[in-house]
Amino acid sequence: MGGVFGNKWSPDSMMWLTFASVFALWAITVSSANLVSEREFSNYKHGRRKLDDIGGSISIDCGILDDYKYTDDKTEIEYISDKDFIDSGENRNISSKFNHETLQKYLWNVRSFPQGNRSCYTIRPHEGKDTTYFIRATFMYGNYDEQDKLPEFDLYNGVNIWDKVKFDNESHIVIKEIIHFSLMDHINVCLLNTGSGTPFISALELRHFHNSSYRIPPTKSLVLYRRFDVGSTTGQVIRYKDDAYDRMWFPYNFLQSIPFDTSSAVDSVNHSEYKLPSMVMNTAVRPMNNDSLDFEVDTNDPTLEFYIYLHFAELEIIQENEQREFNISLNGNSWKESVVPLYLSSTTINSSTPVRGPKLKFSIYKTENSTLPPILNAMEVYIFKDFLQAPTDQEDVNAIMDIKVSNGVTKIWQGDPCLPRPAWDGLNCKDNGYEPPIIISLNLGSSGLTGKISPSMARFKSLEYLDLSNNSLTGPLPEFLSQMPKLTTLNLSGNKLSGSVPSALLERSNNGFLSLSVDGNPDLCVMAPCKKEKKNFVVPLIAAIVSALVVLTMLVVCWRCKRKQAAKQLPSTHQGGRPLKSDNRQFTYSEVVSITNNFQKIVGKGGFGTVYLGCLSDGMQVAVKMLSPSSTDGSTQFLTEAQLLMRVHHRNLTSFVGYCNEGTNFGIIYEYMAYGNLEEHLSDKTRDALSWKERLQIAVDAAQGLEYLHHGCKPPIIHRDVKTANILVNEKLQAKIADFGFSKFFTEGQSHLSTAIVGTMGYLDPEYYTSNRLTERSDVYSFGIVLLELITGKRAIIKSHNKDNTNIVDWVSPLLARGDIRNIIDPRMPGNFDTNSVWKAIETAIACVPLISIQRPSMNHVVIELKECLEIEKAHEQDCGPMTKSFNDTFEVNPLGLEMDMVPQAR
Ligand SMILES: *[C@@H]1O[C@H](CO)[C@@H](O)[C@H](O)[C@H]1NC(C)=O
Ligand SMILES: *[C@@H]1O[C@H](CO)[C@@H](O)[C@H](O)[C@H]1NC(C)=O
Ligand SMILES: *[C@@H]1O[C@H](CO)[C@@H](O)[C@H](O)[C@H]1NC(C)=O
Ligand SMILES: *[C@@H]1O[C@H](CO)[C@@H](O)[C@H](O)[C@H]1NC(C)=O
Ligand SMILES: *[C@@H]1O[C@H](CO)[C@@H](O)[C@H](O)[C@H]1NC(C)=O
Ligand SMILES: *[C@@H]1O[C@H](CO)[C@@H](O)[C@H](O)[C@H]1NC(C)=O
């Protein structure tokens, strides 16, 4: 720092500017007394802009009477009341002690917010979104509440903190300015009570910026730190109408500098994109020593990032033999070289990247050939703020706004529903501080709600808790309530709802997915057919009643499995001669006893009951699964399975014949699969081993069954217990998926379900196991294990005497890495098969079992691949006849191709 003059801002030069102030780090602080003489500006005629330049601007004098508006006689800005921008708070006048007639009118009164933690103004400028706005909030306490206690609170721009508001004294005017690129068509300015006094505001002004100046990336904002009219001769703050954008320029002079000015207008012909006021630009300073202007700005925080704009204009006519040229350095680094200001035309030097440091040290020094000293006309320093917090999910916002209106919510709900915390009264949100928050709970009990349950409720994708109890809601219970994927608590008690409770809702309640309360709605009937005298009751109901109910309701619910698929795949072999009407599916207990010949032959045993062989009067063999009376836990599984079987129809899913529900006797009757399950087939050494083609046919069948559950049903169904024991085979070696006791309905649009882990060791998707996140890809994993068992003849967990048990994937992988296909294939499998087909099947199986679920293919893909395997094998059979090939001749060793492909490639 070579200058002989002080290289710090002089604290004396302008009394009303406070710099090292511990309070107002980000604020320009102005005491009221010093703005008095601003009025004199109205005489100044230079370089005036037209009013249109800030067309669309909104100037709000907070706290004036509702329909009052006035034009400020000095600036000619029209101020309006805040009644259209906020619906809470109280109008208060500042103490007469501070209200003198030279004080700007918008400071005479405030709006104060003793109620609620968060108060938000919502401004909807007609320029809309995707443009840059300049927002200024002004605060002067003036002892409006006669407490003589300076409050402190937070100021938010939307959901992001803008600044803290603190006061030095009762007449201290705090001005906060921000330049903000808005991605939304409305702007929220919020005051947050931080427990240090009641928030209030004096004025709020919004200006629209030309889009080419102060170019900032979306989500970023510039918070004003300093804005100086350097070399001011009047000592006045300059704003509109001198400044077309209504920026406020504060006069400033350096100690060891010489101010100079011109009476000519700057930028009178062309103005730069910054539209700098002539009044600011036609004053400047030059250094006393003629060499360099050195000054520094304390930032007080080395972590902050600053954007700097220095504005220059030549004010003197430069003679032929003279030159004014200078370089600028910042914190010792060269920032800009060879700046030559243009005569009466402004040039702005701005930082292209943000600058940091505890101090910003500027040196503007003349170049070697320059005969004239450097100058400076004006400067702006902004804090660069990254507004990372996204507002609440837009769909949730739309939904809650609609509910607010349609159900007459009278709560003070302003700004964003979730942020800044606390969320709106009655709401709970989930947010990670970065992604858009989502609404997960809505407690509107005893809130005087009226009207019908709003269809907008259906738009909440993540709502878990909904309490609408003790209101005056009317109309029916909408069906969509049962479709809300995450909903676990629904309290509708104490309303005037009518009609009946949707069956799907009762099912969810019965299945333990939902805690449902509907009591205290005199006109609402809970069971179909509706009877007026039905007593109100609270769900969850005891299992027996509900099971009966569910069975009843299931019969009327239309399960929307894809039509064409159903048409294509029906009728199943066993249903052909037996049209199953819903009403003849119910069997009495005595019928079951007779069908099973008094439970004579057991054909299987599951966790929740025993499976008996039965024979219908028409001679059709059936399997009758009876819930063991001791198994109370099993009832849910039984119900799930019954519901599912009734609704899904596919030739690769076991078909439903009927059910029995009498007292404590609950049973499901379905087609009998004579050849038992695949597990027995593969492990039973006394049977003939399945050929490769048979195995492939079984694999294709099972895959099609799963594909149908995942992609053919709405909502999709996840089986959750895919294993060889649950794949049944009939006498034609046609395979069907069985046992839906653990299956889950999966609502569309949902990425996953969080559920308790069920499944079978060895088949269980490791990702589901560790994360509880269930997707249909968990079934794909299990199916991959089934495929590996089909290929290898091994069990999912390979037991060994001397070593730990090995998972089949871990057993296959090293063999595969070596290309040792021969040792992978089930040694019992008859040798005549196409090796390409086996290769492809192994690839398909391996593709199903990555640890990360998204790397697994969908069942659609798996079916396509397996069908190709089958085609290859069939072609081979025709070509070669029953002949055994040598492995060595045909296997290519290509372990690399196996590992990486997400979806198996055709070989
Ligand atoms: C109030 O605070 C401001 C800013 O710190 C200061 O400039 C002004 O002199 C103070 N006024 C009084 C009356 O103390
Ligand atoms: C504020 O003062 C104005 C007159 O200047 C008066 O009309 C108004 O009622 C006052 N408001 C309050 C809340 O006292
Ligand atoms: C500024 O806005 C105009 C139209 O309003 C548009 O044509 C122009 O591309 C915009 N410029 C920038 C830099 O966004
Ligand atoms: C600075 O330049 C002016 C003329 O432009 C001259 O009168 C003055 O003496 C110079 N001051 C110094 C310290 O060199
Ligand atoms: C200064 O002027 C001389 C002669 O006009 C020229 O040769 C030289 O390059 C100039 N230096 C700079 C830094 O511009
Ligand atoms: C129901 O709401 C009213 C106000 O809407 C309240 O006064 C009453 O205490 C509430 N009753 C219950 C049981 O919550």
Image: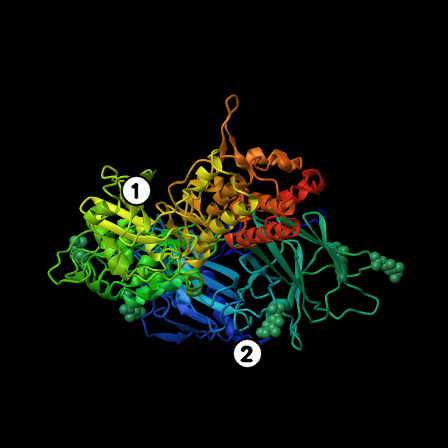
Circle number at residue 50: 2
Pick whichever, 563 or 247, lies toward us: 563
Residue shown at 70% from the left, 56% from the top: 287
Residue 886 in the image: x percent, y percent?
68, 39
Q: How is the image coloured?
A: rainbow
Q: Amino acid at mark 1?
A: Tyr
Ligand 3 image position (quadrant): bottom right
Q: Which residue is mark 1?
A: 612
* Residue 414 higher or lower than 724, as above or below: below
Residue shown at 42% from the left, 67% from the top: 123
Q: Amino acid at mark 2?
A: Lys
Q: Quadrant of residue 714?
A: bottom left
Say few, some or many: other residues with alpha carbon within 10 Å of mark 2 (under 14 / 14 to 19 / 20 or more): few
Counting residues from the start of the chain, the first of labels 1 and 2 encountered is 2
Residue 667 in the image: x percent, y percent?
26, 46
Q: Is residue 722 left or right of residue 465?
A: right
Residue 779 in the image: x percent, y percent?
46, 46
Q: Is residue 902 left or right of residue 105?
A: right
